[in-house]
Amino acid sequence: MVTGIALVGAQHFNDALTNMLGLIAYWTSIYTCIVLEEHLIFRSRYGYQLDDWNTPSRLPVGIAAGVSSIVGVIGAVLGMQQPWFTGPIAKLIGSPGGDIGFELSAV
């Protein structure tokens, strides 16, 4: 990934890498919340059925994770403050410290 960014943004590598890492942070927040909810809320009582991992008919479809990901992306977009885009909630907060996309994507 870094090589691709380096080829495209060789003249401004630091800016390109910083912008990409911001997007990766939003994704990390969304993914971590989904995994923690799955582990702590849904699997804590019954545990993991290790025999089911390779049987697609016994696994969940993943609709909840998909919807949660979409809601997380919407939250990140609403609260992000990046050099190339500022979300509406981040605009309300102001210039210094207005990037709450990480927190909103976790909700």
Image: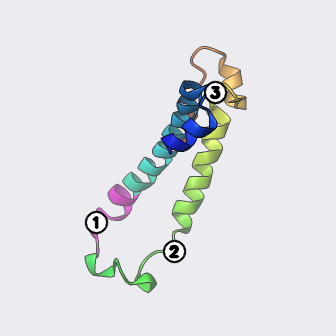
Q: Position of residue 78 (x, y in %)?
A: 67, 36
Name which of mark 2 and mark 3 comes first in the sequence.
Answer: 2
Instruction: Work out whether residue 69 can be spotted.
Output: yes
The residue sitting at 70% across, 31% down in the picture is 87
Location of residue 68 by image quarter = bottom right
Name which of mark 3 and mark 1 comes first in the sequence.
Answer: 1
Q: CA distance from mark 3 to mark 1?
A: 39 Å
Number of the label disc, if any, that sits on residue 81: 3
Q: Which mark's residue is nearer the viewer, 3 or 1?
A: 3
Q: Is residue 59 magenta?
A: no
Find numbered disc 1 in the image and state the secondary structure of the residue it sits on: loop
Q: Which one is nearer the viewer's eye here, 4 or 48? A: 4
Q: CA distance from mark 2 to mark 3?
A: 34 Å
Instruction: Tell me if label 3 and label 1 are in contact, CB under 8 Å.
Output: no
Query: What's the amino acid at mark 2?
Result: Val
Number of the label disc, if any, that sits on residue 61: 2
The residue sitting at 51% across, 74% down in the picture is 61
Residue range in magenta is 38-49
Query: What's the amino acid at mark 1?
Result: Arg
Whether 55 is drawn above or below 17: the answer is: below
Find numbered disc 2 in the image and state the secondary structure of the residue it sits on: loop
Number of the label disc, if any, that sits on residue 45: 1
